[in-house]
Image: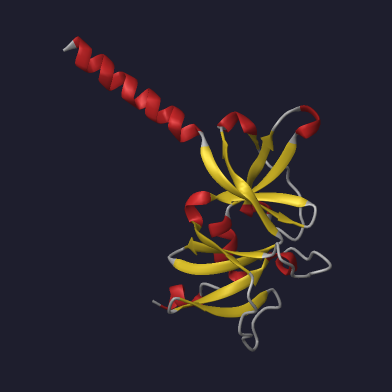
């Protein structure tokens, strides 16, 4: 009995430590590097010009047909009010599954997938800007010393579900 109970007690501790570290897909927009929960990412594709939709917000580039699913494409540079929106060979579309919907977001480039433990994530400072502060879950620190990088961690589901994005009306109608 004692062996069973000690094994049972050890299992939650092991589970808790695996919960502490999470994987993030990092991507760049201009000089900044962002991270989103890897579990929201369906795939990464090269940029292809979407079909424009009339009366869509300026940051929604249009839609693409992805294996029979019509996917709205959000240009994150435009969404974050960054200048010089240009598309090159590094420009990619990250296809996301958020709030039961498939959405694509255009970013300058994808860096890599990284695991961050709770000790590497600091709370985001309060500020107002192009990104709603409630969509920033924290700041991740990668590396040490001169090679240290900051990763702005986004709650991409909350951001894409925000009313000003105009992406989730069909969800509300059902």
The image shows residue 61 at horizontal and vertical percentages of 66, 77
Q: Is residue 64 visible?
A: yes
In this orientation, which residue lies closer to the viewer: 40 or 130?
40
The image shows residue 13 at horizontal and vertical percentages of 39, 23
Quarter in which the N terminus is drawn: top left
90 w.r.t. 149: above or below: below
Quarter in which the C terminus is drawn: bottom left
Please tell me which residue is depicted at 74% across the width and 65% down the height of the picture.
77
Q: Residue furthest left?
A: 1
Please tell me which residue is depicted at 53% across the width and 69% down the height of the picture.
103
Q: Residue furthest bottom?
A: 54
The image shows residue 172 at horizontal and vertical percentages of 45, 74
Please tell me which residue is depicted at 74% across the width and 68% down the height of the picture.
88
Q: Is residue 162 visible?
A: no
Total marks in image = 0
Q: Which quadrant of the figure has residue 76?
A: bottom right
In this orientation, which residue lies closer to the viewer: 63 or 169?
63
Q: Residue furthest right?
A: 84
Please tell me which residue is depicted at 27% across the width and 18% down the height of the picture.
7
């Amino acid at each position: 009995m004692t062996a069973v109970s000690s094994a049972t007690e050890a299992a939650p501790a092991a589970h808790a430590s695996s919960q502490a570290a999470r994987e993030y897909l990092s991507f760049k927009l201009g000089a900044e590097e962002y991270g989103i929960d890897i579990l929201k990412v369906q795939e990464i594709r090269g940029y292809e010009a979407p079909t424009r939709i009339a009366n869509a917000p300026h940051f929604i580039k249009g839609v693409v047909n992805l294996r029979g699913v019509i996917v709205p494409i959000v240009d994150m540079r435009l969404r974050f009010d960054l200048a010089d929106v240009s598309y090159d060979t590094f420009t990619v579309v990250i296809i996301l599954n958020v709030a039961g919907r498939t959405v694509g977001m255009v970013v300058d480039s994808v860096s890599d997938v990284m695991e961050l433990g709770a000790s590497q994530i600091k709370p985001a400072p309060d500020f107002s800007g192009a990104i709603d502060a409630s969509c920033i879950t924290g700041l991740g620190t990668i590396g040490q010393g001169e090679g240290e990088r900051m990763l702005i961690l986004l709650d991409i589901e909350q951001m894409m579900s925000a009313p000003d994005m105009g992406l989730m009306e069909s969800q509300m109608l059902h």
